Amino acid sequence: MRLSPALQKQYTKEQLSARDAQRLAEFIAWGPVVFQASRLMLKFGILDLIRDAEEGLTRQEIVEKTQLSDYAVKCLLEASLCIGTILVNPETERFTISKTGWFLINDPATRVNIDFNHDVNYKGWFDLEASLLNGRPEGLKQWGDWPTVYEGLSSLPGQVQKSWFGFDHFYSDSSFPEALRIIFDECHVRSLYDVGGNTGKWALQCVGYDKDVEVTILDLPQQIKMMQENIAGKEGEDRIKGYGINLLDETAAFPKRDGGLDAIWMSQFLDCFSMEEIVGILKRAKAAMTSQTRVYIMETLWDRQKYEPAAFCLTMTSLYFTAIANGNSKMYNTEDMETCIDAAGLKIERIVDHLGQGHSILICRLK
């Protein structure tokens, strides 16, 4: 296993004293309520109130400001004190924010992850065991009778859909500016297939960045419809086309483009499939390529992360794929991707790391 320096340091040697390890074990055992109590401290605005009070707040002051019962506030404060998101002065009985509490409030990634886990995943985690054993997203049944979450995206309840797309877009959007420069400034791409293009957000970025590029989005027919509604009336929509395709159907070929194709873009896409399925998708991409075509695979490869918390988030996200999304994919490491790319008859030209929220772009060509 090839790990980045930060991960090598964290994952190859014991980091905790026996006492700290025991506390972490209990933290895991009480993990569900740790999450919910912390989420409610945010939702009820208690953490914000404490942060904004220069000298901290007493319990009674928090009761008055939130209009919650004394019982509710007492339970949440005592739990949060033990969780580590707030601190207390035992003489004045005033509560202040801790560093962890500050990050809960201010770190955008943390807030996105909280919404995603509560709205999309929380109930489904109960079926993680069955999902691992059966190879199916057993936790998805809380939302509908679909084989994967992708068929049901357009039918998810409003808040669930909002949190799903909020999670998906947060991690990809921060990488878009650098990715655009890599594709258009370095390679002068004029024709591009956006595979798994969802709502067309990336396609709109492309046509806005380069006035000559034409983008074709390849995705499920229901996603193409959602994309068309989303781009309607926006600048460059005339240079964005949709091509409905079930990317899990091995007989569904990528369209051939007259005059050749410059680029195939796959952003946070291949992690939605098993390694066998990835090879099949890349083989169909290969059939649409010429020697001039490049495939750009943007993924958050967990083993290449610059900071350890990012690897933690990514390996946890793998279990969302298990229980909710599809039952057989994950956040892959570099070795996994290299294996799939090679098996499909492609070769990695270079890898660009540390874009946005920890993305890498693998630039591939025909062997």
Image (spheres, rainbow, N blue to C red):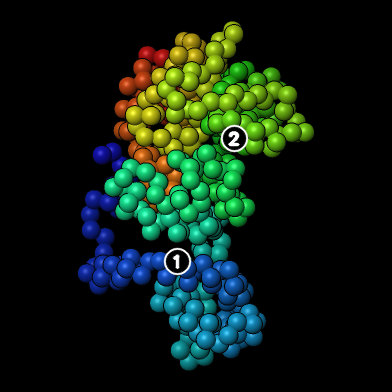
* Residue at figure coordinates x 37%, y 14% from the top left: 367
Question: Is 324 or 58 nearer to us in this picture?
Answer: 324
Of residues 96 and 80, the one nearer the viewer is 80
- Residue assigned mark 2: 223
| Image coords of residue 273 (percent x, y) | 41, 35
User: Residue 136 or 60: which is nearer the viewer?
Assistant: 136
Residue 59, percent across and down? 55, 86
Q: Is residue 291 above or below residue 19?
A: above
Q: Is residue 197 left or right of residue 18?
A: right
Q: Residue drawn at (32%, 51%), measured in percent from left and top?
A: 130
Q: Where, quadrant-wise, is the N terminus in this rendering? A: top left
The quadrant holding residue 239 is top right
Residue 34 location (% of width, % of height): 42, 69
Residue flagged by tag 1: what amino acid is it? Phe
Distance CA(mark 2)–CA(mark 1):
32 Å
- Going by the image, does 267 lie left or right of 209? left
Disc 1, SS:
helix
Residue 137 in the image: above or below residue 42: above
Q: Amino acid at mark 2?
A: Gln
Q: Is residue 198 above or below residue 367?
A: below
Mark 2 falls on what kind of element?
A: helix
Residue located beneath label 1 in the image: 35
x and y, in percent, of residue 293 in the image: 50, 15
Q: Is residue 308 visible?
A: no
Residue furthest right in the image: 233
Tell me which residue sits at (37%, 55%) in the image.
127
Residue 297 visible somewhere in the drawing = yes
Nearest the eye: 129 or 45: 129
